[in-house]
Amino acid sequence: MELRDAYFVDGVRTWFGKARPDGFYYTTRADDLVVKVMRELFRRNPKAPFEQADDNIWGATCQEGDQGTTMGRTTVLTSGLPVRVAGVTLDRMCAGGMTAQALGAAEIMANAADIVIAGGVEHMAHHPMGATADPNPRIVTEKMVEPKYFSMGVTAERLHDWMVENGYPEVTKKEADEYALRVTQRYFKGLDEGYYDDQAVRMAVFTSNGWKIADRDEQARRGATIEGLRTLKTPFKPAGKVTAGNSSGLNDGASVSLIMSGEKCKELGIKPKMRLIGFAFEGVDPSIMGWGPVPATEKVLKRYGMKFDDLDYIELNEAFAVQAVGFMKYFGMQFPEDPRLNPRGGTIAIGHPLATSGVRLSIQLAKDFELNPGAKYGLTTMCVGLGQGGSILWENMVGKDL
């Protein structure tokens, strides 16, 4: 049997809130964030017969409380889908949503599905990363992972040193701060130009100060300066290089995408935005988890016979600026800005609700393609806690026939 093509039809996310008691979503359930974006996806795609969906796949890192009870299945019921639609929840930490897309596409490629809903959610205010985790003591006693490297900030500090020790170009704090400033400036430029308007859905939320409308990425701060960034504390290492200003934040949010087969798109007269070419995940030492996008990208390019220079756009999840700058230097990209990389802002400005972010990257890549129909190929890529990287190759379908 020949593999079939899988297509990204559409995607939508919530605006991302701050993961704290005064944040947008503190009194909102995680599964209600999921239902909000699912229903918005239904509304925006009236031609898609969601009642015929074959699977509802969701990534969530902390699967407890309002993120427990098999999110993929319970949100079938609460979103109004018929009981016949199957659902599942998975965990690949930051790449949970990206993995949901990959597995949904694989189902379609293998002729096990025609319509898949794939998304990611994380309510970090309700479920701080690792708060109730109980790692096997062998991991520590047998020195598989040093306990300090369960902190992602410490791994970012280690990555600064590891690259120099292993002959890769150094990433200085000055460079990390400059990258963080510029990607934030690009975000606000995109925001002001309306780039994000059709990517995120507004949501009425009840807070300690009454009802509000979650209508912006709450973490993003205008007016940052390089002087201000340079004065921030380095909480993970004395006189270190990683600060709150050159790192992603702790956030709440959800993102969802609709993946369909080419046959079903043709049958329904639906024009997809992107074709999923292929995906790859690769492990690295947990102490340098931010390096993951490099080998994952090399792996997926090699497997599908492509070169880095074939890519017109790369949407990279910036857990930390050191990771983004290291990626740029490794692949010979322009620093401090490359027109192909996160052209209208990234995670340092937007926020990083863990499993949500991989799907958010694909939504932005689809928008990049829409604004530049001449672009052909793109990549979404991210690092993953405990030492992994994930990458998905996409082809622009804007203006193309199936």
Image (cartoon, rainbow, N blue to C red):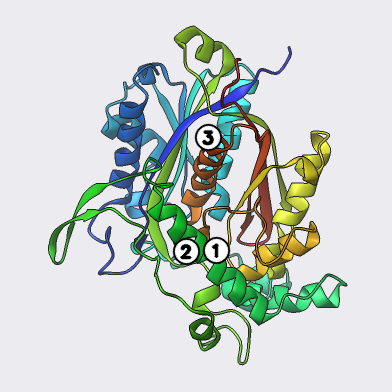
The location of residue 290, given as percent across then percent down, is 67, 64
| Residue lying furthest right | 167
Q: Would residue 142 appear left or right of 249 to someone viewing this image?
A: right
| Residue lying furthest top | 267
Within 10 Å of disc 2 (Cα), the crowding (few <14, some 14-19, many 20+) is many
Work out whether residue 63 or residue 360 is closer to the camera in this orientation and state it.
Answer: 360
- Residue corresponding to mark 3: 370
- Residue corresponding to mark 1: 183
Location of the C terminus by quadrant is top right
Label 2 secondary element: helix
The location of residue 207, given as percent across then percent down, is 18, 61
Amino acid type of disc 3? Answer: Glu
- Mark 2–mark 1 CB contact (< 8 Å): yes
The location of residue 3, given as percent across then percent down, is 70, 18
Residue 61 visible to an observer of this rendering = yes
Label 1 secondary element: helix
Name the N-terminal-most of marks 2 and 3: 2
The residue positioned 40% from the left and 65% from the top of the image is 220
Q: Would residue 170 appear left or right of 96 to someone viewing this image?
A: right
